[in-house]
Amino acid sequence: MSEATARQGERPRLRFDRHELAGAFGDLGTDLPLLLGMILSANLHAASVLVMFGGLQIWTGLWYRLPMPVQPLKAMAAIVIAREVSGSTLQGGGLAVGLMMLALSATGALDALGRRVPKAVVRGVQVGLGLQLASVAMSRFVLADGWPGYVVAAVSFVLVVVLSGNRRIPAALPVVLLGITYAGIFHVDWRAVGGAGLEFPRPHWVGWEDVAMGALVLALPQLPLSVANSVLATQQLVTDLFPERKVTAHQIGLTYSFMNLIAPWFGGVPVCHGSGGLAGHYVFGGRTGGSVVLYGSLFVIAGVFWGAGFEHLAKAFPLPVLGVLLLFESLALMARLGDLVGAPGALVTALLVAVTCALLPYGYVVGMIVGTVLVWRGWQPAWARPRRDD
């Protein structure tokens, strides 16, 4: 579909070709470990988590017609995994953050933030997330399987580099095929997987006490990251990659809230949109919502047919391969910093925000506030200013 047609308001067509299929695996390195960690730590029903997660992916792909996937809420997932928070509190936290985001969207606060937070700050948030993802990829995933893992990671890296931009063989497909082959030979207990029966989501009651506890323990730490990355940074990346499409912070906030007001009642985990997921789908070939629909369909099928054996399947897939996919997702995010190269002051501000986001507790909210104030005040370090004799 041409840009002119898209500007006229017609909904773009979905594609389901090999490039969309390759893009579908661009966010696997982020999602799979978080989902597995929450299922094990909070003793969640795996089929409910997988089917709801996949179903929301499908809905998002059909709604936006863009490779805008659904991701687990990272701050919530980290707290649940570290503290072994109960499933009821986790789902109460999902409802709480959904209500908070709905309030921000309905009052126009999200669009107001989108207008007032400078582009340099949004770029800094993207780079900060990219640094965190790259750190996880290199320090935890690539090193997770010893020398065999180094070899499979190196082969995966070479495949992505060599096939980057190849229209006939999208890079993610041979990489994922390599990972499946490696897992099938060395890790999978096929008897355990084959014994799983049909599973479906289970309705789940969420009480007000769960919402209150989830808001305090999970939603409040998560909200700043969601505003910065799930909404503002994602909206900016849609503008960067699809300038003909008009997607507002208000729209992203509404779909974010809708997902979290629905998923907990059926055993799903709290979710969001995210610039990292969008970058991952895009860098591996996704250009329409088809990549997200395909990605979600894989989770639905896994939940229905292998929900009981998901723990084994997820652990069997080689972490070094996930690490390579995650690394290129992070690089795609950090590459957006390139449009500030001609503006030294904005570039320094973005880097300051990125380091703050990546390294400090509550770094996303601190970085967003500090960076915005510095830009408003016209701050620019002396060593970043152009010299008079230039």
Image (cartoon, rainbow, N blue to C red):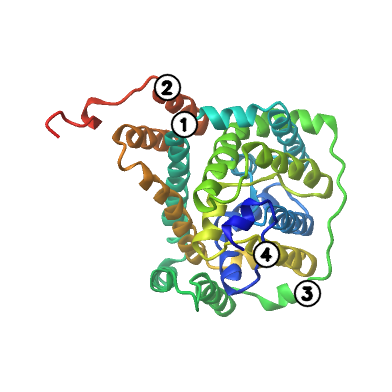
**Quadrant showing the C terminus:** top left
**Considering the numbered disc 4 on the image, is that residue within a helix, a strand or a loop?**
loop
Contact check, label 3 and label 1, Cβ < 8 Å? no
Q: Are marks 2 and 1 in contact (CB under 8 Å)?
A: yes
Label located before the other in sequence (4 or 3) = 4
Instruction: Tell me the residue that label 1 is attached to.
Output: 118
* Farthest residue, direction top: 377
**Mark found first going from the N terminus, 2 or 3:** 3
Between disc 2 and disc 3, the foreground one is: 2
- 315 vs 220, nearest the viewer: 220
Dot 2 crowding, Cα within 10 Å, few <14, some 14–19, many 20+: few
Residue 389 in the image: above or below residue 151: above
Q: Mark 4 points at which residue?
A: 14
Q: Name the residue under label 2.
A: 376
Among the two numbered marks 2 and 1 on one chain, the one whose residue lies closer to the N terminus: 1
- Please name the amino acid that badge 3 sits on: Gly
Number of callouts = 4
| Residue 58 vs residue 168, the one in the foreground | 168
Task: Look at 68% across and 66% down and name the residue there.
Answer: 294
Which residue is disc 3 drawn over? Answer: 195
Residue 194: image tag: none
Q: Which amino acid does label 4 sit on?
A: Leu
Question: Eyeballing the image, is 311 above or below 224?
Answer: below
Identify the element where label 1 is drawn: loop
- Residue 356 lies, in percent from the top left, at 42, 33
Q: Label 3 crowding class (10 Å Cα cut-off): few <14, some 14-19, many 20+?
A: few
